[in-house]
Amino acid sequence: MTGSLTLVILMAVMFGAGISIMLERSLTRVLIGFLLVGNAVNVLIYLMSGAPGLAPLLGEGVDPDEISDPLPQAFVLTAIVINLGITAFMLALIYRSWWLAQLGAKGDLIDDEDEDLHDAEEAADLIRSSAADDAAIQEIIEASDEEPDDDLEERLELEASARDADREADR
């Protein structure tokens, strides 16, 4: 058996195993399957690169036909970098799903009781401050010597009753 036939069989086994593992429900198995498929693609690119040759540097006395093609090497390097990036992303997804599973029914909400108490105290202070402001405004209104406009109240009541009648008519 030759070396390239061994690599072809290895590539086929890696593709098959990777695809079958990727079909599992677990994110960890999907990651392992993705890694297998990524490495199988690298082996495929290596197999398609052709016969090995001289280093891809032109110099004096070097025949251009004897130089190996540098493009497959660049493809493999690019595939490795992309594979590493997607692996890091998948690991972050796996960690996040594990973390959420550990929290249980509480979910992503982590309570800080001291912070909640502080927020409740601030809300109570705002309510007290608002009530004090309302009381002060009411005292000013009552202390003023202006007479309430009775005609204004009657006009507002007439407008409100007309609006109510229009709504009833629209129904």
Image (spheres, grey):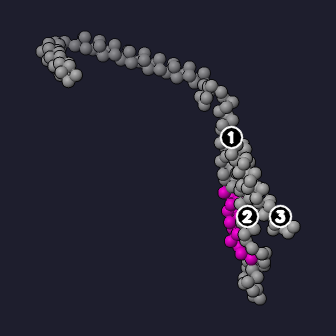
Question: What percent of the width, then of the height, locates residue 44?
Answer: 73, 64
- Residue situated in front as seen by the camera: 105 or 26: 26
- Residue at 69 percent across and 68 percent down: it is 74
Front-most of residues 82 and 147: 82
Circle 3: is it few (<14), some (14-19), or many (20+) Cα within 10 Å? Answer: few
Amino acid type at image mark 2: Leu
Kindly give the residue lying farthest to the right in the view shown: 1
Indicate which disc, 1 or 3, sits on the residue closer to the N terminus.
Answer: 3
Q: Amino acid at mark 1?
A: Arg
Q: Amino acid at mark 3?
A: Thr
At a point 73% along the width and 83% down the height, the residue shown is 65
**Quadrant of the drawing holding the C terminus:** top left
Residue marked by disc 2: 44
* 116 over 77 or under it: above or below: above
Q: Which residue does the image show at 66% across and 51% down from the upper left? A: 86
Tell me the CA gap for discs 2 and 3: 12 Å
Describe residue 35's horizontal placement relative to residue 131 as left or right: right
Q: Secondary structure at mark 2?
A: helix
Q: Does any portion of residue 9 appear in the rendered image? A: yes
Q: Which residue is mark 3?
A: 6
Q: From which residue to which does the magenta span run?
A: 68-82
Q: What's the distance in space between the residues labelled 1 and 3, CA to CA?
A: 31 Å
Q: Residue at x 46, y 18 (%)?
A: 125
Main secondary structure type of the part rendered in magenta: helix
